[in-house]
Amino acid sequence: MTNALLRLVTTLITLFGVALVVFVVIRLAPGDPIAMMLPPGATEADIARLRMNYGLDRSIPAQFFIWLGGVLQGDFGTSISLRQDVGGIVLGRLPATLELAFLALFFAILLGTLLAVIGTLRRQGPAEAAVDLWNGMTLSIPDFLWGLMFILLLGVLYPVFPVSGRISPALNPEYATNFLLIESLLRFDFSVTGDLAMHMFLPAVALALPLSAVIAQVLKQSLKEVMHLDYVMLARAKGFSHVAVLFREALRNAVLPTLTLVGVQFTFLIGGTVIVEKLFSYEGLGNLAIDAVINRDLPLIQGIVLLFAVLFIATNLIVDLAYASLNPRLRHG
Amino acid sequence: MPASTRVCAMVRLWLAGGWLLILLAAAVLAPWIAPRDPLAQDLFLERLPPFWFAGAEPGYLLGTDSLGRDVLSRLVYGTRIALIVAFVAGGAAALIGSVMGLLAGYLGGWTDRIIGRVIDIWMSFPPVLFAILLVAVLGTGLHSVIIAIAVIDWTRFARVIRAETMVQARMDYVASAQVVGRSRLGILVSEVLPNVLPTLMVLLSLEMGIAVIVEAILSFVNLSVSSDDPTWGGMIAEGRTQIHFAPWILIAPMVALFLTVLSFGQFGEGLKDRIDPVLR
Amino acid sequence: MSALLQIEGLDVRLGLKGARLLRSVSLTVDQGEAHGLVGESGAGKSMIGKAVAGLLPRGIAVTRGSIRFDGQDLLALPGRTRRRVVGERIAIIPQDPLTALNPCRRIEGQMTDRLIHILGWPRPKARQRAAELLEEVAIREPERVMRAYPHELSGGMRQRVLIAAAFVADPALIIADEPTTALDVTVQRQVLRLIRDLQARHDTALLFVTHDMGVVAKLCRSLTVLYAGHVVDQGDAGRIFGTTPHAYTRALIAATPRYDRPEESLQPVPPQVIADLDRDIAQADAQRRHD
């Protein structure tokens, strides 16, 4: 109980720190965001009025606490460049990023597990060497480069996939939420699902590859350790094949050490969406963030960065919970 | 380690090191190697394909970009910025990170708690977004890029060095140095630092690759050096806009970036196998 | 009574040209018979059990000989068929109860998966069978134990669970690989008694691997003594404990701790016995190479 409380407090401190750092950093920026919004003929009085509207005439600490007070009531301020409520804009873009990140996570787990299993079943052979080589390569090449290569190879030279946007402009589904992929599945609207999937495939794989290498490496290592244990041997004596033993007995135990690592790595993946979305002109949070920075849209930047921080912290929390529920020793402890 | 794996690791180390040496040579000797002025535009010779495509001009080995600038020359000059960023930004991140990590791991207590909290806060930012934000605030230019990378990526060093230092600080030789009456700083520098140095070198090699990529990303979103100066990221950004008319513009900087990042990564891995006494 | 397990001329090597771990080992276990496999650590006694169950570690292989189980040569069978024969009719009681149960799975699954997935029993029937066996090994609340995870049970409980799991599919042969080594002395005796009772009641053949002559004396009707991968003595337990001419076997018997007379000092195997044995083995090997 005290543990959970301590955790809550440190989480809050971290969030507060994130908010403070962003707030201070972006107020050091030269250039006046207000001046950029107004037409060239605006008078000093116009600028001053607008500045007051956005609260930019106060001292920086005062601005911070006003903003923080708003955030605690769910009010993230108004975007300067889009002139809309920041909370609304950000939450509207969040589903696109979440769908992309989770699709990438799914690919990474699938590919990583497959590689680890192949490397374990065919150990000490050429197959394991190939898996190791591939892991070494995918591990050091970041998502940005993978994305570029995919665009060039599979988007342009052999145009299999679309390389920009989230959905074809011709399709314009009128959905209740912005979770287009999930909603199209629920509505059995498979032409939309297919189009979304084609658009998401390359960015998702680009995001997934580095993570899949991490999963493959760690999972393979722990599978190797587990496969030597007596209960695995005993299961083989019960008449189960190598493959069956691996899936029935070993995988579950080997997953535990992998899981905590995947948590941290998944936050890196979410961070990677920023540039990958830009690369593929995917209408998500990351793309919006870059535009916000370039437009000096202070309230919008703050809102987005805070949301990313919340996502990161939530990921770590979920992983801890999953770890506890998968590990029987903790569940009954 | 079986002999075949060891040979493999050696080959890897030499291949990666070899490519990095080529880069270094290209950066130093750029004015003599580059066939043309990397900034010279020739609008009559725009978007020439590289030599293996039909329609290539002799003398423009890798073709030209949309303003008719020689891609090979820009690539060669681009190694300068890539390597400056790799060494300076990587080195600065390593310096800040290892000082923080050593202090946190060795002193413990409140120092450790505060540094740990700062690392947590730093890790809650998407690094690319953080970098873009910092450069936007600092103003574009090589200085800002280097400062942004160092300010963001020191946590990669601090986290690992802190953990290693904690392990080292519990060792008997540290205790015996304390008994002899050496100062805490002296022990940190003479007893602990040499033992975390191998890890530091490996991390540094990896960080250099990351720095090159971050510079490319910042150039890509037009926040690095001025868009005329030859950088790989700038070339990639240019190639991305031209991708449907002249996809080859993207190839050269992409391959260069790929090999460089791979080499830094593999060099670090190979180094780890060589200097880790436990693995050797 | 007919032979259930017949091993003949078995050679096991580390790699194709590497060290020989077993040399020309032959032994026979009849149906329902308990056979002891005795030797010091490193003699290769566990290798025999592993070779029978098809569980030799990677890189270690049978290079010669045959293992006939119920008339079929296991080594000649294709992998799938062999796994099936082993799965249906041979079971193992492992050495260390702490590592022999999967920490992530409940006891029930680990006891019944052979019945359900290999023998195709319906789940309720398999559950009931598992509960019966747990009662047989004197576990008072089988339902509760079946729902438990391994870490919730004591070491002695886990070993009893493993014994029950070995007997659950009514195998013809059980290979017990030093099942009591990891347990403390009082638990050891309970466990031995359990194995003996179950073996007699179910009429199961037992290949009991141990370094402890005293255990063999209590449990087995016949035995094989191994030294450095060679069979040095073999036969009826009564004869061997009474009148064996082999100095090494006699030395092993003398080296057995007696719980009833702890004040008696232990006799280590005399160096002269070992030297003679090494010489005999070297001669026999030279002879075989010559043939």
Image (cartoon, coloured by chain):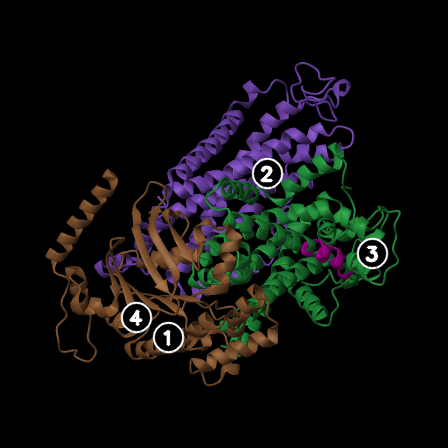
Chain colours: A green, B purple, C brown
Question: Which range of residues does the magenta coloring cover?
Answer: A91-102
Q: Are marks 2 and 3 on the same chain?
A: no
In this view of the protein, which residue sits in the foreground, B54 or C69? C69
- Mark whose residue sits in front, 2 or 3: 2
> Is there CB contact under 8 Å for labels 4 and 1?
no
In this view of the protein, which residue sits in the foreground, A76 or C255? C255
**CA–CA distance in space, label 4 to label 1:** 11 Å
Q: Chain of mark 2?
A: B
Helix, strand or loop status at disc 3: helix
In this view of the protein, which residue sits in the foreground, A183 or A312? A183
Could you tell me residue A274's position as x and y percent? 68, 50
For the point 46% across and 85% down, which residue is it?
A: C140
Q: From the viewer's perspective, is residue B178 above or below residue B127?
A: below
**Disc 3 marks which residue?**
A45
Could you tell me the amino acid type at mark 1? Ile
Classify residue B75 by image quadrant.
Answer: top right
For the point 60% across and 73% down, which residue is it?
A: C123
The answer to whether any part of residue B164 appears in the image is: no
Q: Are marks 3 and 4 on the same chain?
A: no
In this view of the protein, which residue sits in the foreground, B77 or A226? A226
The answer to whether any part of residue A97 appears in the image is: yes
For the point 44% across and 82% down, which residue is it?
A: C139
Q: Residue furthest bottom?
A: C140
- Mark whose residue sits in front, 1 or 2: 1
**Disc 2 marks which residue?**
B142
Residue C220 image label? 4
Q: Residue furthest top?
A: B58
Helix, strand or loop status at disc 2: helix
Could you tell me the amino acid type at mark 4? Cys
Look at the image and say whether residue A97 sits in the magenta stretch. yes
| Majority secondary structure of magenta residues | helix
Helix, strand or loop status at disc 4: loop
